[in-house]
Amino acid sequence: MKKMMIVLLALLSIVACVTGPPPLDWNYSIEAPYQDQVLNYTVLNVYQHYEGFQGYKGLEGIQVSIQNTKSKPIVINWNKSALEYNGTSHRVFLTGQKYVDAGKEVPDQVVGSGSRIDVGVYPADSPYYVSGQYGGWRMRGFTTEAISCLVCVLVDGEERFYTAKVTINIQ
């Protein structure tokens, strides 16, 4: 009897891990990647906003990929970069940052020759703290039909701006 219970629990845990979240109720299309002699820049993924038992509610941010195609390093100035949607421009909050540091200056990021970075980019005004027993840091969601990430890249001491865009198709 104990063996059957253990096997049943193991099977249930495997099924729970495999099923994952429900399918998306919207889809998106990524604009063709930007490519030139300096970098390849594109959106890899769109992050949905999830509100507990209420299900998926809009977006949280996007994941971008920046590849240096130069023979010298480039520098990404995240403080002069922005996430843009619904006619507004937002400072960026990146994966790896502490929630408490949202909205503060973000260190520049060096990308070596031939190297690539993949980073999640969110609006800096999205993280907020909820106190209490079930509290903690959370992200605000937003709705939009298009979102873009404008990055400032320093190439040989010159600032250049590049944009990656996504169109959201809500069904």
Image (cartoon, grey):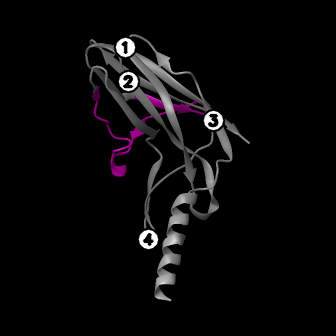
Query: Residue 12: which quarter of the image?
Result: bottom right
Q: Classify residue 82 as left or right of residue 153.
A: right
Q: Amino acid at mark 2?
A: Gln
Residues under labels 3 and 1: Cα distance? 27 Å
At label 2, counting other C-alpha atoms closer than 10 Å, the crowd grade (few under 14, some 14-19, many 20 or more) is many
Is there CB contact under 8 Å for labels 4 and 1? no
**Magenta range:** 81-110
Residue 43 visible within the image: yes
Residue 13 x %, y % = 50, 69
Which amino acid type is shown beneath numbered disc 4?
Gly
Q: Are marks 2 and 1 in contact (CB under 8 Å)?
A: no
Instruction: Identify the residue shown where x is 43% and y is 12%.
Output: 36
- The mark nearer the N terminus, 3 or 2, is 3
State the image coordinates of residue 145 (x, y, percent, origin top left).
Answer: 65, 34
Q: Residues within 10 Å of mark 3 (few under 14, many from 20)?
A: some
Query: Distance between the Cα atoms at labels 4 and 2?
Result: 42 Å
Is residue 73 shown in magenta? no
Is 88 rendered above or below residue 98? above
Which residue bears the numbered disc 2?
67
